[in-house]
Structure formats: C-alpha cells, structure tokens
Amino acid sequence: MAIDELTYPPKGDKKNSAFFDEYRLKIYERRRAAGLEQLLGNMVGIVVQVEHGEAIPYLRELYLLGPYRFEALHQNATHRIYTLCSQPNFPRMIVLEPLTADYADEVTLLNRLYPLAAQKPNARYIGEIFNTTDTGQTREILESHNIRFNYHHETKNPFYTDSGVLFTFPSDYTCNRIGYFQGDIEDIEALKLGDQLEFDAAELATLEKIAEFAQAERLDPLVLGVDHLATRILAGEREDAILEFLTMTHYYFWGAYNIAEMNSSTNVNRNGHVEDDKESPAKVFTANNTPSFINSFEGLPMPTEDFVRNYGRRLHHMAYEVQDGDHRGGEKNVDFVVNTLRDKGVKFLAHVVGECLDDPNLKQIFSKHSEYSILITEYVERCHGYEGFFTKSNVASLTAAAGQDERYEHGHVFD
C-alpha cells in the first residue's frame, strides 16, 4: 500500500527547521501537480566507478560480498562498462572503468580536492538510476524546478550524455548524480552503453568459482540485496540535500534521528510505492550536528564531518540485508555471513553490533573500505520483523569504528 507523503508524519527525534517542513510538503505537492509522481518508478540501477585496471578485482569483491553477478560488458570512447544483476526486480549494478590510467574528468578533479580521495582519483560512487515512462517529460519538469542535467560540452564520458540514461549534473550537496531510464532495464541494449564485448573466459571462470563458493557456503541465499545507500554530507547542508533528493525522485522523508554520542544525525528517505526496500533501496543522509569550526568550541566527536573533510561529500556505505534466522547452534545468519567472509580474508571494522533475542531488533556490521570503490559494505539483519534501519546504539558503534578507519594525519591535526 503506497504511502501518502502529504499526510505521513516523519519519525524520529531530529528537529528540522520550519523551512524544511514547509518546503518538504511544497515539493510533494509540486511533484504531483507537475506529473513527476506519475512518471517515475523504482530505482533500477546503481553506478560505481573504479580506477583503470581495477574493475575485474572489484567484480571479484562484489561476487564475494553480495548477490551481484556479471551480465554484460560494453565499451564506449572512454570506459569499459560492466553490468551486473541480482534479482530481476532489484537494481542493476553498473561499474565504470576508464580505458587509460591517465583518464581525468570532473570526477577526477573532485576527488583530488580531498586528501584521502585523491589516492584513488577516479574511484567514486556515481549515483542511482530511476525508471521513468518518459525521459523527455522528466527532463522538462525537473529543469523547470532548477535541476541541471548533463550536456555534451560539460563532461567527457559519453555514458552521461549518449547512453540510454538521462543524467543530472552532480549535486552541489552530495556530489552524486541521478539518472532516468525509459524502458525495461533487462533490455541491456536499450541502455546504449556502447559496443558489446566478450568477457574474458578465464576471468569469468574465476568469478564462477566465487559464485560456487557463495552457493556452497549458503552466502548466496542469505545475502538478499541492497537495503539502503548512505551518503555523508556537511552539517549545514543536511536539509538542502534531502529536499533536493525529494525534488528529483518520488521518495518521501521517512524520518531522522540524533546520534548524540557521535554528534550526528541519520536521515532516511524511502520509496513509498514498494513493499520491499530492496526493490528500490532507501537513501540515507548522515551529517554532523555542528560544523567542524563550531565543534572546535565543543570538542565533540565528529567522524561524519571528518569523513567529508577527508573524502568529500560522497556515498559512505552500501548496505545488504541478510535473511533473518538462525544458521546453526543459535548463530544468527549475519554472524555466520561475517564469520564466513572473515575466513576468506574480508576485513571488518568491528564486531557485529546489536542484539536479536526475543524482541524485534537488528544486528549490523561495517566492512573496511573497499580498496577499489572506497565504499564500506554493511550487513544488516532485521530480527522478528524489526521495521527500522538502525538503533541509536548500533549507529554510534558503527560510526565510531568507521571514524577510526577514516583518519587523516596532517600537521598537528588528527581527523
């Protein structure tokens, strides 16, 4: 049953400004009046870029960590483009890899602004793709709402301008793009990604061995799909980033919670037209409660803002949902998944946090940053029908663990 965003009372204890509450409702009303609500469908794609030469090892990592499997390989003038799928009704994963080691575009320039991002100047989460029944109308409506789209003279990679996906300009608040695709995402040729190439047979065999391991160890049926995508942004841009995202999609603001221990808030936006978030994953925005220069008075923890200062505004982690249940001897499925992956050399930032006893709750854990995408992988198991995305104690523990791993030493300051 669809959520009526105009009457839905957001959850949480994070206070929003009168400005936010006023324009949140105005955006909902304008989306309906303009016809955007009727045009847009589910999230059908997730786009990540890696460095030249690192797509294959990243695919191996994706095969081990989650349910995505190779579907097709294309090449345009600047990139190889790998498409992966899981369940047919879940978003595809699209991995971009520059054809040359010296490739540079706006993504490269953006990464080079930040000390830890500069180490992998082309590695970045790019954004999401949403289905639409008409890309032309979608562009016309959104441009009238001051949303900018990419045109040929503004970017080097033809994926953003010549494919079957209509992409926005990177957001000033999140640096992510949103793409709009008219058609069936299962029709690979409709994506117009370039010339189709044969995938190396030996490498495909290697990937199949990883898939066989995942099936044999029962990782495959337990790790279900992408649950949510979490972006870290600056303290003063939290409300603007959320309102911009609501303008560009048909998601609704589910709610926001203060995480006092970490001096931050977690803000969740969901697709109210699906029963299962994995069909159109939630978008989460995390921000400091106080900007770093004000926090210098208070001396509070600020791992969220430190991440932005070190890596830039960008996606921080991608979360997979784990099937609820006990694996053996009372071991929860998420503990089994994590222990199995640890035995294969996957590194995690801390132990699994959260309790799953007799009451609804959830257990969660963060991996270390991917060497290739810079993304953290989260695993979350909702126990006994738990309906939320986190508990405050879980988020505090995970944020603290990630903060220790995202430090940057410069001068006499340790972030």
Image: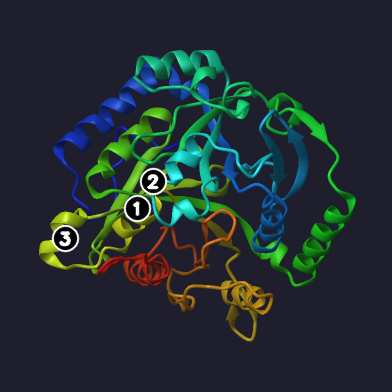
Checking the image for residue 113, the label placed there is: 2
- Name the mark nearer the viewer: 1 or 2: 2
Q: In which quarter of the image is residue 328?
A: bottom right
| Residue at numbered disc 3 | 295
Of all residues, the one furthest to the right in this rendering is 201
Front-most of residues 240 and 118: 118
First of labels 1, 2 by sequence position? 2
Query: Is any atom of residue 114 visible in this view?
Result: yes
Residue 338 lies left or right of residue 6; in this view the side is right
Q: In this view, does 345 lie above or below 307?
A: below
Residue marked by disc 1: 308
Please report the residue visible at 27 percent of the width from the left and 37 percent of the height from the top.
240
**Amino acid type of the residue that numbered disc 1 sits on in the rendered structure:** Val
Marks 3, 2: nearer the viewer: 2
- Which of the two residues, 133 or 263, is positioned nearer the viewer here? 263
Distance, label 1 to label 3, CA atoms, is 15 Å
Q: Where is residue 184 in the image (x, y as percent from the top left)?
A: 69, 28
Distance (Cα) linking label 3 and label 2:
23 Å
